[in-house]
């Protein structure tokens, strides 16, 4: 049996006024306290549907607005430049969850202290992966992959500063062929002062009062010309 809401009354399919338990049409608002079941859909033009639970099983939707797209796994469809919001329990603030404005999709909302963190959680276990794609996932375009082992970037990583954890310096692993203005241990001369590491240098520039011989067979001899110092011999290895 079907029912029609007209003003503040409910009329059945035989045009008879009815009063059904659990249905209230006072002031033109239909309130269902148990279940409202509609055959093909509900259209609420310029209206609001309020419910404790909305369970969407999905289905085929489209085409619409003169388009040709049809999706067989549709559950939620939101119009262009309309957003999905969260309403805060305290203060009743509306905070953006996801939106699409023209060509930009945004998750979260700027300028608010009520959103502290956005987490992407792919599951539990060491084998779980989170991926960020710039383009088609079938192409290796600007991909960032994060898992329990760390973060892998396919492409160019540009950063102002790269730091290690806490006060520990960052560690770079590889042949270093793409680094510039860096002299690594093993490719230069390790310099210490009173057994304290100063650094690794590609070039040593000696100041005044020192006599330096030419490098021969990987050996360079430095003598203090002012006296009062022993001869220093440095062996240089390629």
Image (cartoon, grey):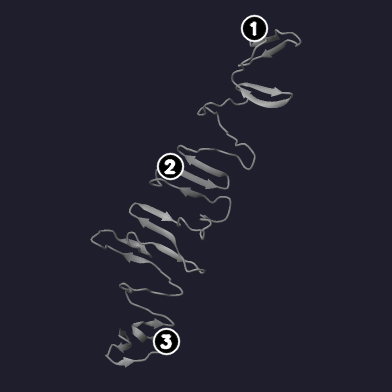
Check if mark 1's residue and mark 3's residue have beta carbons within 8 Å.
no
For marks 1 and 2, the one nearer the N-term is 2
Q: CA distance from mark 1 to mark 2?
A: 53 Å
Where residue 17 appears, as percent x and y from the top left, is 31, 92
Check if mark 1's residue and mark 2's residue have beta carbons within 8 Å.
no
Q: Quadrant of the C terminus?
A: top right
> In the rendered image, which residue does mark 1 sit on?
213
Using the image, determine if residue 170 lies above or below residue 116: above
- In this view, the residue in front, 229 or 190, is 229
For marks 1 and 3, the one nearer the N-term is 3
Q: Residues within 10 Å of mark 2 (few under 14, many from 20)?
A: some
**SS at circle 1:** loop
At a point 28% along the width and 88% down the height, the residue shown is 13
Disc number lying in front (1 or 3) = 1
Q: CA distance from mark 1 to mark 3?
A: 104 Å
Where residue 9 appears, as percent x and y from the top left, is 32, 88
Q: Quadrant of residue 186?
A: top right
Where residue 42 appears, as percent x and y from the top left, is 33, 74
> In the rendered image, which residue does mark 3 sit on?
22
Using the image, determine if residue 218 lies above or below residue 52: above
Q: CA distance from mark 2 to mark 3?
A: 56 Å
Q: Residues within 10 Å of mark 3 (few under 14, many from 20)?
A: few
Q: Quadrant of residue 18?
A: bottom left
**SS at circle 3:** loop
At a point 25% along the width and 62% down the height, the residue shown is 65
Q: Quadrant of the N terminus?
A: bottom left
Q: Which mark is residue 142?
A: 2
**SS at circle 2:** loop
At a point 43% along the width and 42% down the height, the residue shown is 142
Q: Which mark is residue 26?
A: none
- In this view, the residue in front, 206 or 74, is 206
Viewer can see residue 88:
yes
């Amino acid at each position: 049996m079907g029912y029609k809401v007209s003003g503040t009354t409910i009329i059945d399919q035989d045009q008879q006024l009815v009063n059904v338990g659990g249905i209230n049409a006072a002031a033109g608002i239909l309130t269902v306290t148990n279940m409202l079941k509609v055959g093909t859909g509900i259209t609420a033009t310029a209206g609001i549907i309020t419910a404790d639970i909305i369970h969407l099983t999905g289905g085929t939707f489209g085409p619409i607005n003169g388009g040709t797209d049809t999706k067989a796994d549709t559950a939620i469809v939101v119009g262009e430049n309309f957003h999905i919001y969260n309403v805060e329990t305290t203060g009743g603030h509306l905070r953006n969850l996801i939106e699409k404005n023209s060509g930009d999709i945004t998750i979260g909302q700027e300028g608010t202290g009520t959103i502290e963190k956005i987490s992407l959680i792919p599951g539990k276990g060491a084998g779980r992966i989170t991926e960020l794609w710039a383009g088609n996932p079938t192409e290796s375009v600007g991909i960032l992959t994060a898992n329990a082992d760390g973060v892998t970037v396919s492409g160019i990583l540009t950063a102002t500063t790269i730091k290690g954890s806490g006060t520990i310096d960052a560690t770079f692993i590889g042949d270093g062929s793409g680094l510039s203005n860096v002299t690594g241990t093993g490719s230069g001369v390790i310099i210490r002062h009173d057994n304290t590491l100063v650094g690794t240098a590609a070039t040593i520039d000696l100041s005044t009062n020192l006599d330096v011989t030419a490098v021969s067979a990987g050996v360079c001899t430095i003598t203090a010309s002012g006296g009062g110092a022993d001869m220093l011999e440095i062996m240089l290895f390629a």
